[in-house]
Image (cartoon, grey):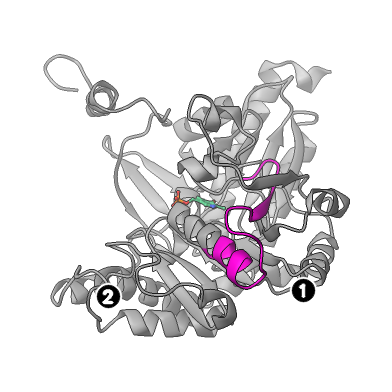
Amino acid sequence: MDATGTSATQALIAKEARYGARNYAPVPVVVDHAKDCLVWDVEGKEYIDMMSAYSSVSHGHLHPRIVAAARRQLEQVAVMSRAYYSTTLGALLEKLSQLTGFERALPMNTGAEAVETAIKCARRWGHRVKGIPDGQQRILVARGNFHGRTTTIIGFSSEQDYRAGFGPFDGGFDHFDYGDIESVKAATSANTCAVLIEPIQGEAGVLVPPPGFFQALREWCTQNNILLIDDEVQAGLGRTGRWFAFQHEGIRPDALILGKALGAGLLPVSAFCADDKVMSVFVPNSHGSTFGGNALAAAVALEGLKVLEEEGLVEHCAEKGEYLFRRLREVQAEVRPLIRDVRGRGLWIGVDIDPSCTTARDLVERLALAGVLSKETHETVIRFAPPLTITTELMDRAVEIFRRVVVEKHRELGLDRA
Ligand SMILES: *Cc1c(COP(=O)(O)O)cnc(C)c1O
């Protein structure tokens, strides 16, 4: 408290609220500093980060090796633009190629920019390689998709909050029902050049596709000369317990979009990855980004990939993910019918709340008060996606707090006596 009785938290929240656009409704926690899976607010209170910035902080906050790599690069050079070569970008591209199995990568900054890159690539490929008249290329997207916030991308969102009032939208997209191959077939036309899809729909509520869907989709795309573009901005780089979520499906897409964790918790770094036969539609002047692939970003991303590999974080995630899933299922059984479903893969779990009991947001705020950071998606789903470095001991602490919060809610609602 200061002399006027205002806490540091209140003062900082008030300042953001007073001068910022109102495009977010943050959970009322003011973060002061963080280390690995723990976060401290300005009052000194400790939290377990079970959100990790939507998977951007998969390595844990301020991983010492990544911070050291950034520091080293900051003694050298940070930003020169792609007008020149750098000492770090080539090594990052090579590493991405080794890990993804794709021949080339095009670096951008945010996830949305990498998605835009994919859309441009698909359309030009559709015209120049597939022979669709220019301007008539169409891309299939799933209902409930989330691919970012640019005007093109929200133009094919099925979420009214993301779209309303932001038109006109430029079209060229057709929708299918996620996980339904018949719906994909019905939406396909001769002008379809690509399917753009998330391997698990995150924003839609951590929806895992039905078994066999991706294999059928892969076959359909191959038969019809359609590019299968896999948006793993959130799912990629270990989050699901495999390096890439498509590996769970036993398929290989034609192109892969990475972001979030690619920046290793320090910077926005994204990439569009594909083989040469697809990537070669890009020639000088056809696409670019001033900051994309800058020397600092490349140094950080490269070190981040090495940390995932050398610290075995992908395998660690698979193991810890199964544990967290099991523990959350136990909590579900204790508070019937408050939790409708627990689903996900690896350390990416959605807890679906029965809306007749309460909202996900209510529980997210109670969890924050109790020292666990999570985030709701839509009205009913609480998302848990801790750093991949999380220990069993910390997960036990977080689950115990979650259990207390939902058991209390259960009691408040009189469900324990029902
Ligand atoms: C977050 C996300 C994006 C957009 O990334 P930004 O960095 O916010 O632009 C795109 N696709 C998916 C699947 C995402 O989760």
Q: Which residue is disc 2 drawn over?
A: 69
**Mark 1 vs mark 2: which is more N-terminal?**
2
The residue located at (57%, 60%) in the rendering is: 123
Residue corresponding to mark 1: 250
On the rendered image, what quadrant is the C terminus found in? top right
Is 388 in the magenta? Answer: no
Position of 366 with respect to 93 (left or right) is: right
In the picture as drawn, the residue positioned furthest to the front comes out as 133
Please check the rendered image and state whether residue 126 is part of the magenta-colored stretch, yes or no.
Answer: yes
Q: Position of residue 155 (x, y in %)?
A: 56, 39
Camera sees residue 227: yes
In-front residue for pair 165/406 = 165
Of the pair 36 and 381, the residue shown nearer to us: 381
Q: Secondary structure at mark 2?
A: helix
Q: Residue at x 84, y 50 (%)?
A: 180
**Looking at the picture, does residue 15 appear above or below residue 313?**
above
Give the vertical position of 23 relative to 246 (above or below).
above
Mark 2: amino acid: Ala
- Residue 148 in percent (x, y) is at 50, 46
Query: Magenta residues, as a range?
Result: 121-145
Describe residue 206's horizontal placement relative to residue 218 as left or right.
Answer: left
Whole-Å distance between the Cαs marked 1 and 2? Answer: 35 Å
106 or 76: nearer the eye? 106
Is residue 230 toward the left or the right of residue 341 in the image? left
Residue situated in front as seen by the camera: 41 or 136: 136
Q: SS class of the residue under badge 1?
A: loop
Depicted 356 relative to depicted 288: above or below: above
Residue at 22% x, 24% y: name it: 11
